[in-house]
Amino acid sequence: MAHDPQTASMAEFLLRLAIHTWPGSIIEFINGLAYAVMGIPAIILGILISRKARGLQTGGMLLASSGLLSIVALLGISLANPIIKLLSPLGGLLALASLILLAFQFLRQPKGDSLAAHPYQAR
């Protein structure tokens, strides 16, 4: 395919819109928006988990923090602020850490026990 100088600028513009790691692309914004939307239930679930059971407080608060960072990162994407945009991967790391902590807490729980039963007691 030959390089056409007349369409090169349009091709570069469309490429910028399509690549999600390219700053200012539509895909970057949609990706950030999806993380922010999923941040809302992460905040709610994280708070509920941390209030329900004592042994799950750290994991629940990490999950809620992850959701909050994802929402703030969308603001960074909207403002084209590279420092605030870095909160998105940080939120992902917090989500991973919270899931690991919560998984270990649930695996330590004796078989057949529900969340409100031993070893975790509701406050």
Image (spheres, grey):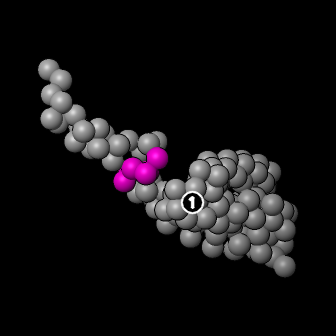
Instruction: Reply above or below: 89 against 74.
Output: above
Q: Residue at x 55, y 65 (%)?
A: 75
Query: Which quarter of the figure is the N terminus placed in?
Result: top left
Q: Evaluate whether residue 117 shows in this view.
A: no
- Tell me where residue 103 appears, x and y as whole percent: 71, 50
Q: Evaluate whether residue 14 shows in this view.
A: yes
Instruction: Reply above or below: 58 against 92.
Output: below
Q: Amino acid at mark 1?
A: Gly
User: What's drawn in magenta, residue-wise?
Assistant: 23-28
Q: Residue at x 39, y 50 (%)?
A: 25
Q: Residue at x 63, y 56 (%)?
A: 84
- Tell me where residue 17 appears, x and y as whole percent: 33, 47
Query: Which quarter of the figure is the C terminus placed in?
Result: bottom right
Which one is nearer the viewer's eye here, 35 or 85? 85
Regarding mark 1 in the picture, which secondary structure is present there?
A: helix
Which one is nearer the viewer's eye here, 47 or 25? 25
Dividing the picture into quarters, in which one does residue 10 lie?
top left
Q: Residue at x 43, y 56 (%)?
A: 29
Dividing the picture into quarters, in which one does residue 67 lie?
bottom right
Quick check: 60 left or right of 20?
Answer: right
Which one is nearer the viewer's eye here, 94 or 78? 78
Quick check: 95 left or right of 78?
Answer: right
Quick check: 82 left or right of 103?
Answer: left
Dividing the picture into quarters, in which one does residue 102 lie?
bottom right
Which residue occupies the extreme front position in the image?
Answer: 5
Residue 115 in the magenta stretch? The answer is no
Residue that mark 1 sits on: 76
